[in-house]
Image (cartoon, coloured by chain):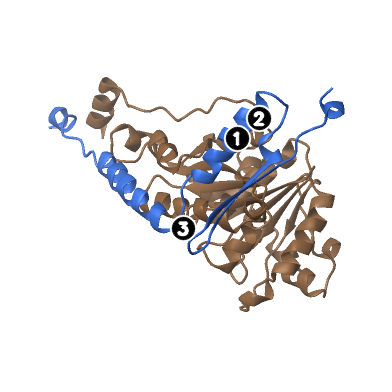
Amino acid sequence: MAKVVVVTSGKGGVGKTTSTAALGAALAQNGQSVVVVDFDIGLRNLDLMMGAERRVIFDLINVIQGSANLSQALIRDKRLENLYLLAASQTRDKNALTEKGVLQVISELRKKFDWVLCDSPAGIERGAVLAMKHADIAIIIANPEISSVRDSDRIIGLLDAKTERAKNGQEVEKHLLITRFDSSRAGTGEMLEVDDISDILSIPLLGVVPESKDILSASNLGIPITLSNKNSTSAQAYRDAAKRLNKEDIPIIIPTKKRNFLAGWFSGRAA
Amino acid sequence: MNFFKLFKQNKSAPIARERLQVLLAHERISTGRSELVSRMRQDIVDVIARHVGIKTDDVRVKINHRKSVFTLKIDMEVPTAQDSS
């Protein structure tokens, strides 16, 4: 059975698109068929993260309006044959995304793929609501920072109110993915801890992706981090998160907490 | 000196946590997000599951607020004896 996942956050710039690309590629590497769908109409970026920006001919809006069929709009990844992209349109008309059209596209995708990953736009407006509408699972991306946590809480409220599952009296399965985590700053009490965030939001943790320079270089290259730099700790964190989505029981490793006294002292002296 | 700096760390995270806890407790009331529905669903599933095999998804719980009426609708699929054998 296909699973529809929305990657959402409320706040912009926390890593939704990067995470969608990284998780999509990791799931595809496990051998499952995956499509990543960009719902950010007018501001598409998932095509860049996937390195497919020059191959977009038809997009989600074309399919909804009937000017292209789905198989024409699906862009197959150059590296993984079971990974596809459905790009967003660059049109300024946000109303081009219709409720009926989204339902039709999602139900077609459900038939073709094991995983349908929807990259939500920021905010809590129409676009974000339509992206989560048909989700079975939600991945809430949060940074260890108060505004991000507050906005995540709003999004959790929307998931419980506006989705089809909520309307049918069911629940969307929610997971927390913390990105841009800096363990040394959390260790010294300068940054919210992983436990603080998951306790406050009270949803289960899917993973912790450390802040890393590798993320920027992956986006520069247009290759999801899980494919571009397999040894990176961030790539490892995304791969583990993808396995947890597949219900594999993998312990969550939170990057080392406190610097020990002497190490801190010596590195301080050397600086 | 470095040695003293170690004891004078900038611990702002506990303040962030406290501010969030207070703020969200408040906002959840005004936006109507409480865990009431999901907690009730889980309790209902736990009770039923002691006797028949059901999953969380088999139980649908809906709450409706109208002006003066508060309705709770519970809808569940219970497997027949054939299914469970």
Residue at 59% across, 59% down: A162
* Above or below for A261 versus A16: above
What chain letter is assigned to the residue under label 1?
B
* Pointer 3 with pointer 1, Cβ within 8 A: no
Report the chain shown in brown.
A
Name which residue type carries label 2.
Ile
- How many angstroms separate mark 3 from mark 1 (CA)? 35 Å
* Above or below for A268 versus A59: above
- Nearer the observer, A113 or A48: A113
Residue A225's x, y, as percent? Answer: 60, 44
Q: Quadrant of the C terminus of chain B?
A: top right
Q: Is residue B53 left or right of residue A202?
A: right
User: Which residue position holds label 1?
Assistant: B44
* Pointer 1 with pointer 2, Cβ within 8 A: yes
Name which residue type carries label 3.
Lys
Marks 3, 1 in one chain: no
Q: In the rendering, what colour is chain B?
A: blue
Give the SS element for disc 2: helix
Residue A155's x, y, as percent? Answer: 50, 54
Q: Is residue B78 left or right of residue B30?
A: right
User: Which residue position holds label 2?
Assistant: B48
- How many angstroms separate mark 1 from mark 2 (CA)? 6 Å
Outermost residue to the front? B68
